[in-house]
Amino acid sequence: MQTRRDPIRMSRRGFGAVMLALGVIGLGTPASAEEAKIRIGIQSVPPDEAYAAKDWLEPYGITGEIVQFSSGGDMLQAFLAGRIDVANGGSARLVSMAASRPKFFSIIAAHQYGGDRYAVLVRPESPIKTAADLKGKKVGAVTGSGTFETFRVFLENHGMSTKDLQVVNMKVQDIRSAVQQELVEAGVAWEPHVAIAETTAGLKRVMSMKGVNASPNFYLVNREFADKNPDTVTKFVASLIDLAKLIENRPDEAGKLAAQAISQKGVAVDPKALELSFTRLTVDRKVTDDLIAELVPIAESMKDANRIKAVPDFKALVDDRFYVEAMKIAVSSR
């Protein structure tokens, strides 16, 4: 059964589970036995919300302990601390991890990608329509996020840089209200926050990052966990493939699932907003050379800025055996 756990509470229980496991091993249970559960980190993005709304692992006989995080940064910190087994992260943070701890994790599947999921929001009466119109304006954004890095490239493509704007760093949850209350003149956000702002607050989506880059997010697995539990990881990837098929074929149904998950946190969301957001992203799970290649210019830029010492070997991080085997057992592939 798939369950949701508080990160702090789960870490305490995880300690108890480790102690219990040690006791069981001491009684003669083989140490090599696979875990029938996997700890899954998710964040507030449409595919993760849809995944949390249904027990996608039930057909495969394993349990998922789902832990929600407010951002990809928080989730990856928990991942590196060993509090979750799998996580998903944006390009910039993945580059940093690959440069500092390349042996800790493997890339096992694509999460979501496509620049159309990033957009600039303004008030309905705003005269802002183009990138040039942003010059000198206060723009709310989550600096350091994959969205912001893509926005940087978007500006460069239009002969501008973030120095031409007044960037105000804030949480993505606050961008909509900041634009509404005229604390900033525009906001840069990602789905589903963009679609929700359009449908519930009447804000305008005046430009997206479509065509700038794919800005892929990837599913990452703790390498030690994967080596000890290959069958469990394969089944997890199979569940991701099942969700991807639903999103591609029935975005309306996926929208209802995501809205259901969000409503459980006390926030009412129109399923149509989530359906709209699903049409703006790609969720094919296969990790392609083109997607991995997108990480290289980001790494080169970070190296030039002395944020990393060298460009990592990203292809060496990809472990596609789980995807290959998952395609054979995925319910949606039968």
Image (cartoon, helix red, strand yellow):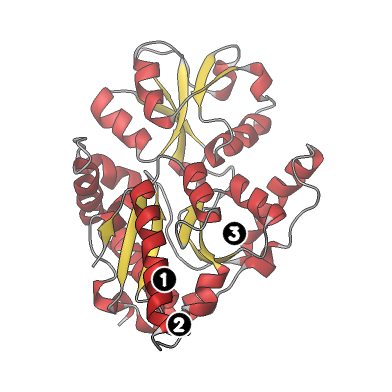
Left or right of 294? Residue 334 is: left
From the image, which quarter does the C terminus lie in? bottom left
Q: Nearer the viewer, mark 3 or mark 2?
A: 2
Q: CA distance from mark 1 to mark 3?
A: 18 Å
Circle 1: residue type: Val
State the image quarter where residue 320 is shown.
bottom right
Going from N to C along the chain, the mark reached first, 2 or 1, is 1
Q: As displayed, is residue 115 above or below residue 245?
A: above
Check residue 291 in the rendering and tell me which mark sits there, or answer none.
3
Going from N to C along the chain, the mark reached first, 3 or 2, is 3
Circle 3: residue type: Leu
Rendered residue at 48%/24% (across/down): 170
Q: CA distance from mark 3 to mark 2?
A: 20 Å
In percent of width and height, residue 192 lies at 35, 40
From the image, which quarter does the N terminus lie in? bottom left
Rendered residue at 50%/71% (across/down): 225
Q: Are marks 2 and 1 in contact (CB under 8 Å)?
A: yes
Rendered residue at 78%/44% (across/down): 303
Q: Does dot 2 land on a helix, a strand or a loop? A: helix
Check residue 325 in the rendering and tell me which mark sits there, or answer none.
2
Dot 1 surroundings within 10 Å: few (below 14), some, or many (20 or more)? many
Seen from the viewer's position, the closer of residues 68 and 21 is 21
In percent of width and height, residue 326 lies at 42, 78
Q: Does dot 3 land on a helix, a strand or a loop? A: helix
Q: As displayed, is residue 109 above or below residue 173?
A: below
Q: Does dot 1 land on a helix, a strand or a loop? A: helix
Left or right of 116? Residue 242 is: left
